[in-house]
Amino acid sequence: MPQLADTDDDLKYSVWEQRCKLEMTLKALDSVAKRGGSAHNLPENHYFYITFVTKECKKGIPDWLHTKYPNDLTIVLQYQFRNLEVNRKRKNISVSVVFNGNEENLVIPWKALTRFDDPGAKITFLLGNSDTNQHSEHQNLSLKDADSKSPVSSNVIKLADFRPSRVNSPS
């Protein structure tokens, strides 16, 4: 994330823009957290893709995730998550998500966030500095891709891909 200190002699539009994007991201997450912090508390038609730099999480994610995703990871908060919390004092987000049938608690510092998407609202925010986003494997994720049946990236796991397909019977 860019340095967020303002100086009196310069208009820091890019800094202010990043602050606004981060604040909107945190407000969306905090809104769900305050409703109970689980998949059942998402407003209808909303779900979140959160992309973050795994190297910035140090002890906040399990070692096996660091090994499997050494650069960045996108998690989807839609069906299997709980304990979502935005901690403004520690400047992190924590959430319990399910990977391969096992629940893992993730603690993600705000400085690790590189992207937030809410396809239900057609909102995408690129967070952090441009250097971080240039190295993200998910920079070109579009909302059209997010709503398609094919996986967006090898680092994004869509539960819809594992559901049986519905076949319409002729009327």
Image (cartoon, rainbow, N blue to C red):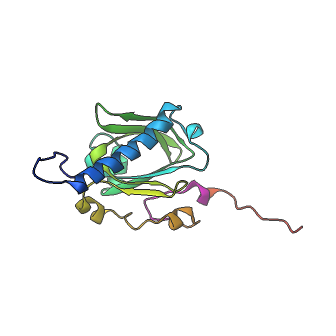
Left or right: 40 as drawn, with respect to 116: right
Q: Residue shown at 37%/39% (left/top)?
A: 93
* Residue 133 rendering spot, x and y as whole percentages: 30, 61
Can residue 89 be seen in this snapshot?
yes
* Residue 100 rendering spot, x and y as whole percentages: 51, 48
Kindly indicate the quadrant of the structure image that contains residue 89. top left
Reply yes or no: does residue 71 show up in magenta.
no
* Magenta segment boundaries in residue numbering: 152-161
Can residue 83 be seen in this snapshot?
no
* Residue 39 rendering spot, x and y as whole percentages: 56, 40
Left or right: 162 as drawn, with respect to 154: right
Main SS of the magenta part reads loop
Q: Quadrant of the C terminus?
A: bottom right
Q: Residue shown at 24%/55% (left/top)?
A: 13
Q: Residue shown at 60%/50% (left/top)?
A: 45
Q: Which residue sits furthest right?
A: 171
**Foreground of the two, 22 or 170:** 22
Q: Which residue sits furthest left?
A: 9
* Residue 6 rendering spot, x and y as whole percentages: 16, 46
Left or right: 108 as drawn, with respect to 163: left
Q: How many marks?
A: 0
**Foreground of the two, 40 or 5:** 5
